[in-house]
Structures are given as structure tokens and as C-alpha cells.
Image (spheres, coloured by chain):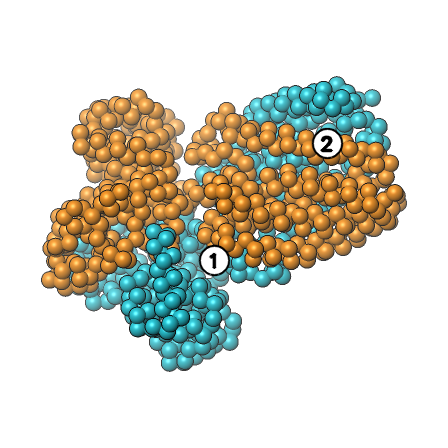
Chain colours: A orange, B cyan
Amino acid sequence: MNEELQELMETLNSLVQEKKYAELRAQFNDMAYADIAEFIMSLDDEKTLVTVFRILSKDISADVFSYLDADSQETIVRMITDKEIERLMDDLYVDDAVDFLEEVPANVVRRVLANTDKETREIINRFLEYPDNSAGSSMTIEMVELHDRLTVGEAIKSIRRTGVDKETIYTCYVIDDKRKLVGTIPLRRLILNDEDVPLTEIMSDEEQLIYVSTMDDQEEVASIAKKYDLLSVPVVDKEERLVGIITIDDIVDIIDEEATEDFEKMALLRPSEDEYLKTNVFTLAKNRIVWLLVLMVSATFTGQIIEGFEAKLATIAGLTACIPMLMDTGGNSGNQVSTLIIRGLALGEIQIKDYFKVLWKEIRVSVMVGVVLAIANAGRMLLLRLVTGGGTANNVIFVVCLSILAAVMVAKIIGCTLPMIAKLLKLDPALMAGPMITTIVDAVSLLIYFGFANAFIH
Amino acid sequence: MNEELQELMETLNSLVQEKKYAELRAQFNDMAYADIAEFIMSLDDEKTLVTVFRILSKDISADVFSYLDADSQETIVRMITDKEIERLMDDLYVDDAVDFLEEVPANVVRRVLANTDKETREIINRFLEYPDNSAGSSMTIEMVELHDRLTVGEAIKSIRRTGVDKETIYTCYVIDDKRKLVGTIPLRRLILNDEDVPLTEIMSDEEQLIYVSTMDDQEEVASIAKKYDLLSVPVVDKEERLVGIITIDDIVDIIDEEATEDFEKMALLRPSEDEYLKTNVFTLAKNRIVWLLVLMVSATFTGQIIEGFEAKLATIAGLTACIPMLMDTGGNSGNQVSTLIIRGLALGEIQIKDYFKVLWKEIRVSVMVGVVLAIANAGRMLLLRLVTGGGTANNVIFVVCLSILAAVMVAKIIGCTLPMIAKLLKLDPALMAGPMITTIVDAVSLLIYFGFANAFIH
């Protein structure tokens, strides 16, 4: 399929170059919105980009617009007329309009809102006030609401009348006179039931209702949708009135976003909502530098530990050479377990109450792993002595092996404990990942190493 | 909502203890399948677990079964009668049955298949042959197929007749006489059109058809569903005949699985399909040890580099103490960029052709970050000298700062290059993450460090 798409893109490109706009428009009518958007975003020249966007027939231009990235959206809105903006805002789903307005500069937002009808403008302004990453900020208001007095037949008629403008019609929400959410009905159940059945008879019970509040975190929304296999999650206000829904396509985006955020935090990057290639160099540098500085400064401790031991390191052959190996092995061991725990916590597979189970598991795993590594290391060092004829003494080898075992155990214990403490303190466990663990494990393993060296080497 | 669920679980628990099974059954009828499954999985005693499962009314027991984890499913199947297995297999969707059979021991599979009707057994056997993580292994065959000769009214009638047994009816697939997939129609479009419109008039064109093949990787399926916002992705065989669909709930699971796999690979763990708490200690140890060994042995090089320099380290104060800080800073810098690149490649935001753009970006970022870190480090070392009255000479401080700048630059360049080389070689970029980069960057930064030390300190 990829090659076909590649070919199509080349055809479109030549149509643009030859200015065959009628043909181009005909091609677009046969294409998926996402592919049209991909083509438009691939155009380098701003003027061409806007020209091509204008070619789109009116009934699909808003759909295509919602698939564009923020840069292209901004370019288009900057260059089209007020009249065109008005029509575009009229056709966009509210959640797509809000997504777009959240990304563009304030002057563009002002111009767009000035060309939006009063009612929509008020709704959008309300949406823009919800905190980032809240359920309210990701919801849409174009859902199917059915009154609890209707029958199946009346409901289907109502959907046929209003359904064209709804973002999804596959889950219908039943409300009472006060707009309070009282039940849900999948369209499927409507279709498979007889016309004269009252909705109240086939809708889900109130006890079974699954919903979120406007201020809930979007991560919560995603985990509910996953657990109950929902196609959309209803959002209610403080009075339990239905105010919007979040559809599965947005939930999929949320899942990706949350995973990306964890990847970034685990690598000690300040999370960024922009794609890498679209982020400028200063922002990239800024997002990285804070944690690098913190960790560099905290490495002062490791330096001090070594300094206090410099006399011994200078006199006994082989001790210094093993420092990097010991540090890396400890760091890597800690990294492995912290990753498992952080991911487990994020997916809800591990809870804080499992801590002692986890700890006991890690103690056993670390003994096994540590012993194997220690033995392998003894082999490695003996072989090295044989090959190079170096002067590493037996007791040095013994101390290094013992330190590996201890370092692995300490690393595993720290690696499983810190993310869970973070969770307990309502901090993000993802911050307790590799680099952070490494810095702590480094200092501890050096202390252990020098402790053993003092005890066994004279 | 969580507290309500907690309370409900406690109520259910006391009902089980008091053996009030009729009341328990009534409670279950008001609950979501996922919550019933959660309750059943929380039961420690196998006998109680099976008793409670048997209480479920017949029309929901297969649904609840599909939400259970493999352990509980196995327990149930081991303890129920052949007759009960037969009914269960009859009610399960094929993809859920296959998921379950892939996880249980061979003798359980044999017993289950022996109690499955011939037709289903043949289908299941075919599914079990598809490779893990292929589209074929995740698809379901319970989809709505409509013949291309039908009208909207006939189509709706056919859906009403057969829809109860379909996993989703929201996207209908149009096939010709040879079962070749010729178009798709969202149920929405059926409902919103008049009864006498022929399907061919409102279905998507053939050029617009989006589908995958049975042998395509499930990652491909997820990225297509995300790009086109699909609720289900059709799967075709070599002759382009429709053989199944993959629904959005399974796609959401695939997205989570793929992210987890990347997290694991990036921490140098062998990917595992089981949840952490359910994996035994030996498997956990086995999954971790290989890479730890490889990296430990490769740290031999770092050791050799230090050994070759031991004489100088022993005589010049402060040189050894800075080794951990230099190594950590280099490793962390490399980790940051490799994470961004790996995630960008996984989400399709970065392509191989962007390499030089990425490299040029990273060179500029690394100069900025490196200079700031070098200056901060100079301040840190000068302050430390003042406070401790230590004897770190000016030229040592100069060498350390210069090495930091160089190490950051090298780390960023290696960190963005290796994942892209892996992608080019069709290896998984996730393997070129933190720990791997750290090991390489360690050796290079030490060489740079000692090189500068030789040049500037006599």
C-alpha cells in the first residue's frame, strides 16, 4: 500500500506543478482525508499550500483541515479571507477547532474567533479554559443525545435527522429533563430492537454508567476506555449533566501522547508536545539542559568519594580500571527494573500495595543475576590477566566480583523502590528512571566497592 | 468512580463468603463485563473462582471470559465439564478464543479443541498458524459482509438478522461474488441514506480502500488505524478476499503492547508478553542477564583505556575523581537524543531521509548544551577547590571542561546516528537506546579525556 501512496503523491505533485487544478480536485474526491492532508503538508511553498487547500470541495475542506499539523493550519488561516474562516469554523467539529486554536499564536486566535458566530465562540472560549490534558479540553460536543421518553423508532428518526453533524453516532447518550446523563445505548442495540420499545427499557442502567468529569486527567479517560472497550467516553459537569464526549480516535492519540511523555521523562527530557523535527534548536537545548545540570552537579558526590580513596587507587593495580564496569553494570541493572515498574504502574498492572511482592521478587532476581555476573566477571578478569600478563591480584578480583553482586542487588532494590515512592507521593514515577537511578546507584556502588577494598586489600 | 467500584467489590466479596449466589448473580447482571472479570480475577481460591464463573448467566459468561487473564481462563477450563467448554467455545468470538488458546498449555488446547465443533475448530487451527504479532493472528471473523448487489434497506435488514453475533457492525464490508473486498460503508452512512439506494452508490471507492494482509505486522495495522481514524481494519488474503477484521479495542491493545516492547528493549530487557507480577523470578532473571553480560564484557575496553593511563591518573590530583561525572554526563546526553529519535521513528514522525536534518540539529543543540555544562562545571570545580582547599590545578579544570563539551557533542552525534542506522538495517531502533549508547560513549569520552589530559597537562 505504501508504494501506491507514493505514486499517487507524485502524480498529485505533477498536477500541482502543471496547475491542472480541476484534475487535482477530482483526485482529491477519491482520497482519504488523512492522505490529502499528508499531501498538503508536504508542499514547501506557502502560497501553493493555500492554493491547493482552496481547491478542496467545500464539504471536505474542514475534515482535511483537522488532519493538518498546526504549522500548516496557521499558514492557511493567515492567508485566507475572513469569509473563508467563517465557513471553516462553521464546518469544524468543536474539538478539532479547539485543538487548532490551542496551537496557534494569540493574534490568529483573535482573528479566527472574530469570524466565528457568537454561540460557537462562547463554546470555544469555555473549552479553551479547561486545563491542558483535562477531559474537558479533549471532548467534543457533537454527540447524539436522546431524551429518555423516546422509543427506539423515534430515536432512530432523530438520529437520521441530526446525525450528519455528529462526530459519532455509535453510542447514544440518554438524558432526562435536566440534561442529566441517565443511560447509554449503542446504536447497534437500537438497530437490533423493535421500533416501539422504549429507550429506558434497553439502555444501560444508571449503576452501570461509565463517565468522567470535565476536570479529570486525560490519562484517566484513556484507561477507562481501554478497560471497558468503549468507542466514546461521556463527560459530565459537577451536576452530572452531559456536556461532551471523547471519541476513540482522540483516545488513541492520548495513549500515544502519554507513552511519549513517559519516554521523554524517563530520558530526563522536559516533555514537549511538538514533533522532534518541528522543534527548534533552542527549545530542544532548553528541554535537555536542566536535568543534565542537576545530574552533573550531583556527580560531585561520586567525585568526592573517589577523591577520598585516591591514595589506595593509586597504589593498587586494577582497582581504578574496574570503576566504569562497576558503574555501568549497576546503572543498567537499576534501569531494567525501574523501566518495568514504571511501565507497570502506567498501565495499572502494578499497584502501590504490591510493593513487598515486587521487592521480594527483585531480591531473588538480583541474587541470581548478580551471581552470574560476578562469576562471568571473575572469568573475564582471570582471562585478561593471562592474556595481558597484567598484575591484578586475586584479592582485587575477589573484591570486584563481590562488589558486582552487591551493586546489582542495591541497584535492583533502588530501581524498584524509587518509582513506587514517587507514585505514593503523587509524583510521576517516570522521573525515577535510568539516569536518576544511575546517579544514585553510582555513588552507592562506589562506596560498597571501596568498603570491600578496605576490608580485603591491605 | 474508583471508590464506588471498591465498595461494590467488597459487597460482592461478602456475598461470596455468605454463599448468597442468587443475589450475586443479580448484581452481576448490572455490572460491566470488565468489572465482573476484575472481581473474578481477585478471587484467590480456584474453587471459588470457578463457582462464581458458573453463576454468570449464559448470555454473558463468554463475554466475561474474554476479559479474564490467561491464568484464570486456564483455571476455569481445567475445572469445568466438556459440555460447558463446548458452550463457551460456541459463544466466544474467534479472536478471543484464539487469544486464550495461544496462552494456555498444549493439553488444555487439545481438550478445548476436542469440544469445539468441526467448523470452528478448523478456523481456530488456521488462526493459530499465523505468526505472532501478524494481522492474521489478531483478527476476528465476525464482521458484517454485505453483497455488492444489495440496497441500503436490504443491507439494514441483513444486519438486523445477523448483527447480534458480529463483533462490530459499525463498519460494513462490501464483497463481490468472489468474496473480494470491493468497498466499505460505515453503518452511519446506511442509517442516514434512503432505503432504495444501492450500496455501490454510497460505498467507498476501490481506490480509497484501506486494508492489510494476513501476514502484515500488527504495528502496521495500528499505524493505519491511527492515520485514517478507523474503527476496524479489514484483513485480506493473497487473492484480496476478505478474511477478517481487526477492531479498535484490539488495536488499542496493540498500541500499548508495542510501546511496552519499546520500553523493554530500550532498557535492554528481552520483551515479555506477560505482566510483571505474573512473571516468575527465573524468567525475569533470564530476560535481563544477556544484555548485562554483553555490556559488562564490553566494559573491558573502558577498563583497558583507564589501565593504559593509570600512571598519569595516579600522579595528577583530581583527574580520577572526574571520571564518573564525565561518563554520566555523556551517557545522559546520548540517552536523551536516542530516546527522541527512537520514539520519533516508532511514531513515523522521523524518517531515515531526515538524517542530515537531525544531525545538523543535534550538532547545534550539543554545542549549546555542552558550553553551558562546561561553564557550570568550571564554576562547580572552582567552588569545590575554594571550599575543600583541594589541589585541583587550573589546567585540570580546563581539560575537564573541554572534555565535557566534546563528550556531549560525541554523545549527541552517536545518540542520533545509531538508532537511524539500526532502522536502515531493518533492526529495531529501540535497541540503540540508553545503555548501549552509554557503553559506547563511555569509551569514547575517556579517550577524549585522556587525549586532552596528555595534550594540556605535563
What residue is pinned by disc 2?
A304
Q: Position of residue B108 (x, y in %)?
A: 48, 75
Can residue A237 be spotted in the picture? yes
Q: Position of residue A264 (x, y in %)?
A: 51, 38
The quarter of the rendered structure image containing the C terminus of chain B is: top right
Question: Relative to A394, is B136 on the left or the right?
Answer: left
Q: Crowding at label 1, few (<14), some or many (≥20) Cα neighbours within 10 Å? A: some
Q: Position of residue A233 (x, y in %)?
A: 30, 49
Q: Nearer the viewer, residue B443 or A289?
A: A289
Secondary element type, mark 1? loop
Residue at screen point 77% across, 41% down = A450
Residue at screen point 81% across, 41% down = A319
Q: In which image quadrant can residue B438 be found? A: top right
Can residue B189 be spotted in the picture? no
Question: Relative to A6, is A31 on the left or the right?
Answer: left
Question: Relative to B221, is A284 on the left or the right?
Answer: right
Question: Relative to B450, is B260 on the left or the right?
Answer: left
Secondary element type, mark 2? helix
> Which amino acid, by three-letter code, is at mark 1?
Asn
Chain of the residue where label 2 is placed in the rendered structure: A
Q: Is residue B363 above or below residue A189?
A: above
Q: Position of residue A426 (x, y in %)?
A: 47, 42
What residue is pinned by disc 1?
B133
Q: Is residue B49 above or below residue A89?
A: below
Q: Which mark is residue A439?
A: none
Q: Nearer the viewer, residue B64 or B356?
A: B64
Chain of the residue where label 1 is placed in the rendered structure: B
Question: Distance between the Cα atoms at labels 2 and 1?
Answer: 50 Å
Whether labels 2 and 1 belong to a single chain: the reply is no
Q: In which image quadrant can residue A7 be found? A: top left
Q: Crowding at label 2, few (<14), some or many (≥20) Cα neighbours within 10 Å? A: some
> Which amino acid, by three-letter code, is at mark 2?
Gln
